[in-house]
Amino acid sequence: MYALRFFLSLHFIGGVLVPFFLDWGGIRYSQIMLLQSFFVISIFVLEVPTGAVADYFGRKASLLLGALSLSAATVVYAAYPSLYIFAIGEFLWALGGALLSGAAEAFVYDTLGEMGEEHLSKRIFGRFGTVELIALMVSSPVGSVIASTAGLRYAMLAMSIPFFIAFLICLTLEEPPVRREGEDRNYFTLVQGGIEYFRHHRILQVLAFDSISIGVLAFFVIWTYQPLLQSLGISIIYFGFINAAMTGAQIPIMNNFERLERLAGSKRRYLAVSSIVPAIGFILLGFVVWVPSVICLLLIICGFGLTRYVLFQSYFNKHIASHNRATVISTISMLSSIVQAIVYPIVGYLVEWSLPRTLIIIGVAMIICTLISRIQEEYLID
């Protein structure tokens, strides 16, 4: 699973994604955000059904199909610079992401369950996330070099190779047994059961609100830092290296959650710190123009804001029964998609209006969401 996550995370296009759409694709920033809105709407449509595929047909089957879909998506993206072609690529990427999202984490957690080591889930998910970050760190600079020498199109096309290798790795996986409660159920009962499970589980709802609201807003650092660097006159060849540094900033945080929680005084307090700190970083980015300071703020935002999902993967799984774990996690991802679909176009038009003011607005919104969060310490089970 570590190897699978590594090859699925070799995103050569990551450091130059916005220039890929703007320069090679010839579309506007607001159209990029509309594409992302279409992407998350596709996720919304696909998340629960693909989660049920993982629960009913097996995690391995879901992972196999997901890796193939991502490989096909990169070929479509690079086929021709057109908004409509990009939309097809977004749908294939959404399909692959949906097939992988609930299944990968459920596969890992059920494997730990089979080994009697569920208590290590926070540490294992941290390592799982670290492997992903290492791959992103390796691939981003390579992608920038490919883009600046061969062209932006080839940075996208090159990703089809590691994604197909991930498919081959899936063939070697041994599926852990799923602990079912009662008799086997059909596909549609699984879908309905996952949604109902979440709808009647108040703790999961509270956790999901905090995870989704802060996570969606923090993720906009990925979509705004490249226009910000371009506005500061930084050459595209450096984007991947800066992206690698932003990724690397997440590794020490992701591997020291327990220590950071002790320093903060509690798990709940650390969650608050991990949202307030990047919120302040966004607000400062709206004012700062000195390049070293901008890069430092980007590292801080990524380090704290983009690592929270790992903690929540651990906390979510503690409240979900094994037999519909992938479906419930996919339900939460579906809710995240709804929020993203609404927010992406808004941010797209805000950026075209004023990038600095947009960054400030994102930071203020993160602070508001933190203040209204209702997470209690007893919800955060190790």
Image (cartoon, rainbow, N blue to C red):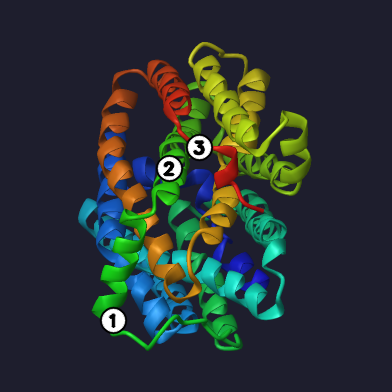
Image-based side of 315 in relation to 350, left or right = right
How far apart marks 1 and 3 lie (CA) works out to 33 Å
108 vs 359, nearest the viewer: 108
Residue beneath label 3, please?
375
Residue beneath label 2, please?
206
> Disc 2 residue type?
Val
Q: Position of residue 335 (x, y in %)?
A: 32, 50
251 vs 93, nearest the viewer: 251
Q: Tell whether label 2 touches label 3 (CB within 8 Å).
A: yes
Residue shown at the point (52%, 24%) measured from the top left: 279
Residue shown at the point (67%, 53%) measured from the top left: 382
How far apart marks 3 and 2 lie (CA) works out to 6 Å
Q: Earlier in the sequence, mark 1 or mark 2?
A: 1
- Helix, strand or loop under label 2: helix
Q: Where is residue 340 in the image (x, y as percent from the top left)?
A: 33, 43
Mark 3 surroundings within 10 Å by alpha-carbon count, few (fewer than 14), some (14 through 19), many (20 or more): many
Label 1 vs label 3, nearer the camera: 3
Reply above or below: 250 against 364: below
Q: Can residue 349 be seen in this view?
A: yes
Q: Earlier in the sequence, mark 1 or mark 3?
A: 1
How far apart marks 1 and 2 lie (CA) works out to 27 Å
Reply above or below: 325 against 287: below
> Disc 3 residue type?
Ile
- Helix, strand or loop under label 1: helix
Q: Which of marks 3 and 2 is nearer the N terminus?
A: 2
Q: Where is residue 119 in the image (x, y as percent from the top left)?
A: 70, 63
Q: Where is residue 122 in the image (x, y as percent from the top left)?
A: 67, 56
Image-based side of 21 in relation to 3, left or right = left
Residue beneath label 1, please?
187
Mark 1 surroundings within 10 Å by alpha-carbon count, few (fewer than 14), some (14 through 19), many (20 or more): some
